[in-house]
Amino acid sequence: MTPWRLVALVATLLFGAATPVPQLPSRTVDLRQWGYNAPPGPGISYGEFYLPMPLVSVYKNGDVAAGFVTRGGATFGVRGRPTLVLHALRFDSQGNFLSRSKSPTMAWRGNGIFAVGGGDLLVRTPDALTLWSQQGTVLATRNLVDPYTSVEMSPNRETLLLVRPGYDVHLLLAPELTSLKACTDHESVHSISNGGLAIGFHGEPNHVVVSEICGPAQFEYHWTRRNARGATLLDDRRFVIRGPSGIEAVDRDVPLWHDFFGKSEIVQELESDENGTILAVALSKYVGGSDLLDINGHLKTMRIIIYRTSDGRRLAQVVVEHPPRIPSNFFALSRDGSLLAILSDGFLQITALSAQ
């Protein structure tokens, strides 16, 4: 066993499974009070082919934005499109309602909301980006040529990257939607850093490359384990790779620490604070499945573990009270790592994280 693997194993034993972590209490808001209804089941009318986008975000001051789509009235009807409305609600950190904005949208999915600098809200529908002020006025708009364009926001919420796989990428200044860079790119992007770097898998699932946006590659890393499923930049050097049942933190090409989970738990997604010091990792636990009989298990529980990225120590965990049917882009960490917001099937769960 190599020295770094021995150190990582000892750290996992000391800080991971062997050390109990506090389970933090939450406040839960039932969005049915504001008109939430479960969307229709999967199908063409559901817009299942559009990319899932986050519908929960945390402002710098700790307020939380939560979104959902409903059927709209005649006011929002557009010829050839469904009469759907994207609602963006704002709550304080205690779950008290503050305000609401409404935007017409063309699909049940493919919508997203992002809290940006200065307290404004960026709303993404399949055909447009719209920047809303705190007073409810439109500050800027940008049409999206391709409804399958993905949106990646930097941890400090100052820039965002629009990616049309196989076509082009555009780096924008988030508070204004003005263009900073544009180029042609044919690779996927998993996340971007505050310093203008992007990370993705190139050529093979376990080959991670970090590149300057619209620029040359900076460094690369080959993950020694199987089935890498995603990578997230913590800063311009460090990143975290997730597999089906484990995560690994790396500094350029040097592994820092790793953590593994039981066979019944699957890593869903992760997010860090703006400085890359705190990491939140969502885990789903399935029961009743059988690989031998090719039977899928059913979701039993879900939790989110909070890590200190300097050494991989588990600091706390939050049990997801209403595990989502589609576990994608369903939680957000505040920029300073002090607040966790979870949006799941009409319930907004807000958790204050203890001082780290």
Image: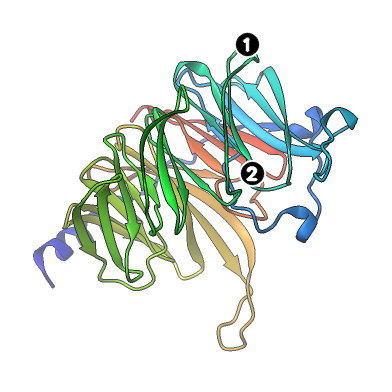
**Where is 286 relative to 34, above or below?**
below
User: Residue 333: x and y, percent?
Assistant: 46, 35
> Residue at the bottom extreme?
292
Describe the element under mark 1 as helix, strand or loop: loop
Q: Please tell me which residue is depicted at 64% across the width and 51% down the height of the picture.
A: 323
User: Residue 334: x and y, percent?
Assistant: 45, 30
Viewer can see residue 18: no
* Nearer to the camera, 330 or 109: 109
Describe the element under mark 2 as helix, strand or loop: loop
**Where is 345 relative to 188, above or below?**
above
> Residue beneath label 2, please?
126
**Where is 315 relative to 134, above or below?**
below
Instruction: Say few, some or many: other residues with alpha carbon within 10 Å of mark 1 (under 14 / 14 to 19 / 20 or more).
Output: few
Q: Please tell me which residue is depicted at 30% across the width and 38% down the height of the picture.
A: 276
User: Residue 174: x and y, percent?
Assistant: 44, 28
**Where is 99 relative to 72, above or below?**
above
* Nearer to the camera, 59 or 80: 80
Q: Please tell me which residue is depicted at 31% across the width and 34% down the height of the picture.
A: 194
* Nearer to the camera, 95 or 125: 125
Q: Please tell me which residue is depicted at 82% across the width and 45% down the height of the picture.
A: 80
> Residue at the left extreme?
3
> Residue beneath label 1, please?
135
Viewer can see residue 7: yes
Which of the image's four quarters has the N terminus?
bottom left
Describe residue 274's horizontal placement relative to residue 100 as left or right.
left
What amino acid is found at the position of numbered circle 1 in the picture? Answer: Gln
Residue 188 picture quarter: bottom left
Compute the Cα span from label 1 to label 2: 24 Å
What amino acid is found at the position of numbered circle 2 in the picture? Answer: Pro
Colour scheme shown:
rainbow
Which of the image's four quarters has the C terminus?
top left
